[in-house]
Image (spheres, helix red, strand yellow):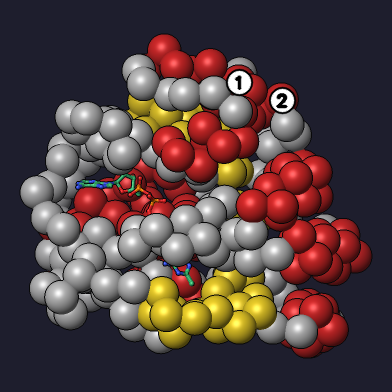
Amino acid sequence: MKTALTIAGSDSGGGAGIQADLKAFSAQGVYGMSVITAVTAQNTQEVRSVQDIELSIIKDQIEAVFDDIRVDAVKIGMLSSAETAEIVANSLQKYQPKFVVVDPVMVSKGGHHLLQLEAVSALKEKIIPIATLITPNIPEAEVLIKAPIHSGEDMMEACLAIHALGAHAVLLKGGHLQGDPNDLLFDGKTFTWLQGTRIQTKNTHGTGCTLSSAIAANLAKGASLIESVQEAKKYITVAITHSLNLGNGHGPTNHFYELYNKANLVIK
Ligand SMILES: Nc1ncnc2c1ncn2[C@@H]1O[C@H](COP(=O)(O)OP(=O)(O)OP(=O)(O)O)[C@@H](O)[C@H]1O
Ligand SMILES: Cc1ncc(COP(=O)(O)O)c(N)n1
């Protein structure tokens, strides 16, 4: 069985972070493992508090996994602090995983900072250069390139600028722009648009976590970058279509694998 490792924060509400990542790995038929960087006390409405995990424990978790178990792909989510970003980058240096998908998580749907502002430069300098693929949403990309993004043309410019920071490929998610959520993939040579159809729901907690984990799972299974992104876009679209009305805020997406396997959806 292929394997994937998520390095991310825990969401007690189960909709985002490590919990979403492991659900997505399982639904994709990949064995999931986790390194927890921070514990959040969170539900569908808010992040109440955050406890960063001690740096030595983060390093130990990474080493415990890699020293014993084959890791076919890594996904990185919430990093919280500059120190955590650095210890993750330095620890991965030793093991050189083949695929590293980075979801540059910055702010929760409820507006809570999940990456300290002063940690953005560590993300740029330490983590982006080791990314096979980085998957920012529009606000995250705006922080990375320090420029506003309003149109498809702006999205293309942003992909080029983020690629220049050292990521091998960029998937810029268009969900935060008006209209249909079309995402743009740049692999260093070619631009590919992934067309979406906007689903009218408030239950989109953890969509970015789910998408990036589904991409990592497909890379682990040996799919190409474009195939992995298309399969993951299909997965997140089905997961949002059947999202769950749990809690009073942004409910979670639905990882029930039978829905996905039965869905006759083609992403172009
Ligand atoms: N309402 C929607 N209907 C269909 N697809 C959507 C919708 N909202 C987002 N998407 C898609 O879901 C994926 C995740 O994008 P999004 O922009 O929501 O990420 P994100 O903001 O990083 O998510 P999060 O911060 O909740 O983890 C993208 O492929 C995006 O196009
Ligand atoms: C631990 C953790 N990781 C990531 C997110 C982002 O998800 P969202 O933007 O849907 O709040 C989150 N809320 N919590």
What is the x, y in percent for residue 210? 39, 62
Residue that mark 1 sits on: 160
Q: Can residue 224 be seen in this view?
A: no
Q: Crowding at label 2, few (<14), some or many (≥20) Cα neighbours within 10 Å? A: some
Residue that mark 2 sits on: 164
The foreground one among 182 and 73 is: 182
Image: 138 above or below 36: above
Identify which residue is drawn at 63% across, 70% down.
Answer: 7
Identify which residue is drawn at 45% across, 39% down.
Answer: 139
Please state, as top left, top right, bottom left or bottom right, where the C terminus lies in the image.
top left
The foreground one among 70 and 84 is: 84
Image: 35 above or below 205: below
- Secondary structure of the residue carrying tag 2 is helix
What is the x, y in percent for residue 240? 20, 58
Ligand number 2: quarter of image: bottom left
Identify which residue is drawn at 27% across, 74% down.
Answer: 44
Q: Which amino acid lies under the numbered mark 1 shown in the image of this protein?
A: Leu
Q: Crowding at label 1, few (<14), some or many (≥20) Cα neighbours within 10 Å? A: some
Contact between labelled residues 2 and 1, with CB atoms less than 8 Å apart: yes
What is the x, y in percent for residue 75? 59, 61
Label ID, residue 119: none
Please state, as top left, top right, bottom left or bottom right, where the N terminus lies in the image.
bottom right
Identify which residue is drawn at 68% across, 35% down.
Answer: 168
The foreground one among 88 and 191 is: 88
Numbered-mark total = 2
What is the x, y in percent for residue 203? 19, 63
Q: Is residue 83 visible?
A: yes
CA separation in Å, label 1 and label 2: 6 Å
- Secondary structure of the residue carrying tag 1 is helix
Q: Quadrant of residue 152?
A: top left
Q: Which amino acid lies under the numbered mark 2 shown in the image of this protein?
A: Ala
